Image (cartoon, rainbow, N blue to C red):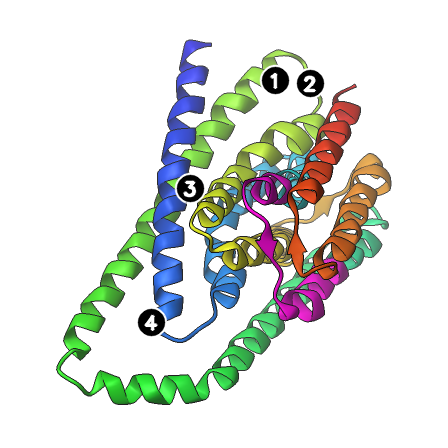
Amino acid sequence: MYLEIALLLSGLFILILGGDFLVRGASSIALGLRISPMVVGLTIVAFGTSTPELLISIKAALSGSPDLTMGNVVGSNICNLALVLGVTALISPIYVASDSVKIDWPVTMASSILLFLIAREGFINMYEGVIFIFLLILYLIFLIVKSRKENQRMEELESLASESPGHKTDFKALSKDIGFMILGCIGLYFGAEWFVGGAKTIALNLGVSERVIGITVLALGTSLPELTTAIIASLKKQTDLALGNLLGSNIFNILSILGITSIITEIQVNDLIVNEDMIWMMGITLLILPFMVTGRHLQRWEGAVLVVIYLYYTINVII
C-alpha cells in the first residue's frame, strides 16, 4: 500500500512540472509564430495531454478490458468539462473566444453525439475507427489553415524581422520552447502512468468494477495532465489556452484515442456506459454552451456549478 501511495504522490508532482513545461513552451511558440494560443491548445497541448489516455486505452483493450477503455475516455471527457473546467474557472474567469463558440464547441458536441450513435450498436470496429481518424485529420487541417490565413499579414512582418541579426536568437528561443514541450509531454506521460498505476491497484483491491474504475480512478488520473495544465494556464492568465486545451482534449479523446484503439482491436461497449455515462457526457457538453455565450466568460459561480455536478455524478457512479 505504501508503494502505491508513493506512486500517487510522485505522479502528481511530475504532472505539475510537466504541465508547467508544456504550457510555457506552447504559449511561447504560439507568440513567436503568430499562431493563436487557442489553436496551439487545440492541437499540440491537447494531443500531449491525451497521450496517457491513448496508451492506457490501447493496453486495456488489448488485455480484454474494454470497460476500462471506454470508461477512461468517457469519464475523462466528463472530468475535463466539469471538474477541470470548473476548477479553472474558480481560480480565474475564463475568456471565451468567438471561435470556441462557433467552431470548437460544435466539433466537441458533434464528436460526442457521433460516438453515442456508433456505440449504441455495442461495439466500435476498425472501419468506424478509420472514420474517427479521418474526421480528426480534417479538423486539424481546417484549424491550421484558418489560423495561418488569419495571421498571414503578421507572419509577413515576422518574416521581414527574421532577416535581421536577431534571427539566430529567435531560432535558439524556438528550440528551447520545443525542448520545454517535449519535457512536458514526457513528464505528463510518466506522471499519469505512476498515478494511475497506484490508484488502479488500490481500487482493484477494494473489489470495484472495471467500469467504475475507468469512469472514476482512471478518468481522474488521466485528466490530471489537463487539470494541471489548465490550472497553470489560468494562473498565468492564459485562459484561452486552458479552454482550448480542454475542448481539444475531448475531441482527441474520442476521435484519436478511440479511433486508434478500435483500428488496433475492436472495442466492446457496455450498455451502462452508453445509456448513462455518455448521456452525462453530452449533457455537460451542452450545459457549458450557455456559460460560454453569456458575457463571453466562464465566471467563478459557473465553475462552482460544474464542480458540484461532477461530484454528484461521481458519487452516483460509485454508489
Mark 2 vs mark 4, CA separation in Å: 48 Å
Mark 4 vs mark 1, CA separation in Å: 47 Å
In the rendered structure, are the residues bearing label 3 and label 1 in contact, judged by CB atoms less than 8 Å apart? no
Q: Would you say residue 100 sits in the magenta stretch?
A: yes
Q: Which residue is mark 2?
A: 208
Q: Which residue is mark 4?
A: 32
Mark 4 crowd level (few <14, some 14–19, many ≥20, 10 Å Cα):
some
The secondary element bearing badge 1 is classed as: helix
Q: Which residue is mark 3?
A: 189
Query: The disc labelled 1 sits on which kind of residue?
Result: Leu
The secondary element bearing badge 4 is classed as: helix
How many discs mark residues in the rendered view?
4
Question: Relative to 52, does residue 98 appear above or below in the rendering?
Answer: below
Q: Which residues are magenta?
A: 84-111
In the rendered structure, are the residues bearing label 2 and label 4 in contact, judged by CB atoms less than 8 Å apart? no
Mark 2 vs mark 1, CA separation in Å: 6 Å
In the rendered structure, are the residues bearing label 2 and label 1 in contact, judged by CB atoms less than 8 Å apart? yes
- Residue located at (59% from left, 37% from top): 60
Q: Is residue 115 visible?
A: no
Q: Nearer the viewer, mark 4 or mark 1?
A: 4
x and y, in percent, of residue 197 in the image: 49, 26
